[in-house]
Amino acid sequence: MTTARGGAAFTFVHAADLHLDSPFVGLSKAPQTVRDRLRESTFAALQGLCTLVRQERPDFVVIAGDLFDAADRSLRAQLRLQRALADIVSTGSAVYVVHGNHDPESGRKAKLDWPEGVNVFSSGDVECLPAFNRAGELVAHVYGISYATAAVSDNLALRFHIREGAPFHLALLHANVDGDAKHDNYAPCKLEELSASGFDYWALGHVHDRRVLREYPHVVYPGNTQGRNIKETGPKGAYVVSVSDTGRVAMKFRDLADVVWQEAAVSIEGIGTEQELKHRLLATAEKVQADAAGRPVVARFRLEGRGSLHEKLLQPNVADEWLEELREWLGVPEETDGWLWPDSIVVRTGGVWSLESVSGEEGFLGELLRIGLSVANDEALTRTLLEEAAEALATQPRLRDWLQKRTYEERSAWVRQAMELSASYLREGEANDGA
């Protein structure tokens, strides 16, 4: 579906969630080379954005919040951003920016001047600014509002209203659409509200997964420009958006990540020895490196499938031993591209028998699994069970918040893993009793 606009064609870049100077916590055991490269990776992705602008020569760039990782932003992050934005506007592309929950207006910041051509929306109310193409023609109105403080609970989308006089209307907003449980519910709004607002393109930030929620009108999350942990895997970058004189929108995603986070599955099905598992781990590591096309990779290896190695993998410290050996085999990353650092190995395997099949047996184990499966298959029961089991942890605010954000799929998987472990121990006990 397109609309006849009667305006000139133009191109813009949509980026969000730069998170400059992210600390990358939880990597104390990683070599210094890995830590140093990750520490610089958000800045490298920013440079990638500058390179993208020089190559594509868009008419303007929009950045939808969380340019910095912390409200009290580091000086080096501010200076690097100032330099990068000066680089972008020197190519003839204007820049439009809003601040989000990580970098609200209330945060501590240095007294630096934005380069001419950089437009930063305030937190007072939604502002409307004109956007021009390189020929000087008005091609769009760009609307935006920044966060005043970190925790914004108001539906900011309701404050956006079209101002006539431009052929295209672009709304720049840092928000959680339809209450994504994986992200804090700041500036919550509904997709149906955005769709009915009259805007042609909602340039969103906050959700770190790349998503096109709707087309015509377009409602788009580009994701962040650099993954920051093992939950932010795969390509990360920005969209290059071209709008024709008839309103047709064409989008191209460009990967800007300097370091790739990846989760790789390794199946134990069909193998019965540790030597075979070693071969699969190394073959998977080789493929992950090849897919990264020369960029550094931080990877989690997920052992899955059903097989005879399942019980051995559940033994205490076995996964840690495999991780240490895998790191030894791959070697210490050097200060060059193309290295792979195994972040972790997680065991998600099952025995040669399925829980469902054993649950049909008579006796204690069968009854235990029948009860467990009924819980795992019921969202309310799963939540109740885990809340009761973790009651002692609920006194810790950060742990409580983390548990509350877990999805039903994650909670159900925990219950099934617990059943797998219980079944393995009980089976082992029965075998020993009969020996």
Image: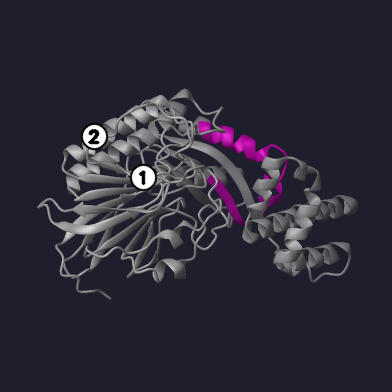
**Residue ID at (51%, 37%):** 342
Q: What's the residue type where badge 2 is placed? A: Ala
Find disc 2 in the rendering and name its residue: 86
Residue 78, image quadrant: top left
Report x, y in % for residue 272: 62, 51
Residue 381 drawn above or below residue 99: below
Residue 192 visible (yes or no):
yes
Report x, y in % for residue 66: 43, 43
Residue 11, image quadrant: bottom left
State how many labels appear: 2
Residue lying furthest top in this view? 32
The color scheme shown is one colour
Q: Secondary structure at mark 2?
A: helix
**Residue ID at (22%, 37%):** 116
Range of residues picked out in magenta? 301-327
Q: Disc 2 or 1, which lies upstream in sequence? A: 2
Q: Nearer the viewer, residue 78 or 430?
A: 78
Density class for disc 2 (Cα within 10 Å; few <14, some 14-19, many ≥20) is some
> Residue 290's mark?
1
Report x, y in % for residue 404: 67, 52
Residue 312 in magenta stretch:
yes
Mark 2–mark 1 Cα distance, whole angstroms, equals 35 Å
Q: What's the residue type where badge 1 is placed? A: Ala
Density class for disc 1 (Cα within 10 Å; few <14, some 14-19, many ≥20) is few
Residue 375 in magenta stretch:
no
Q: Is residue 39 left or right of residue 241?
A: right
Q: Nearer the viewer, residue 172 or 145?
A: 145
Report x, y in % for residue 255: 32, 48
Q: Nearer the viewer, residue 134 or 58?
A: 134
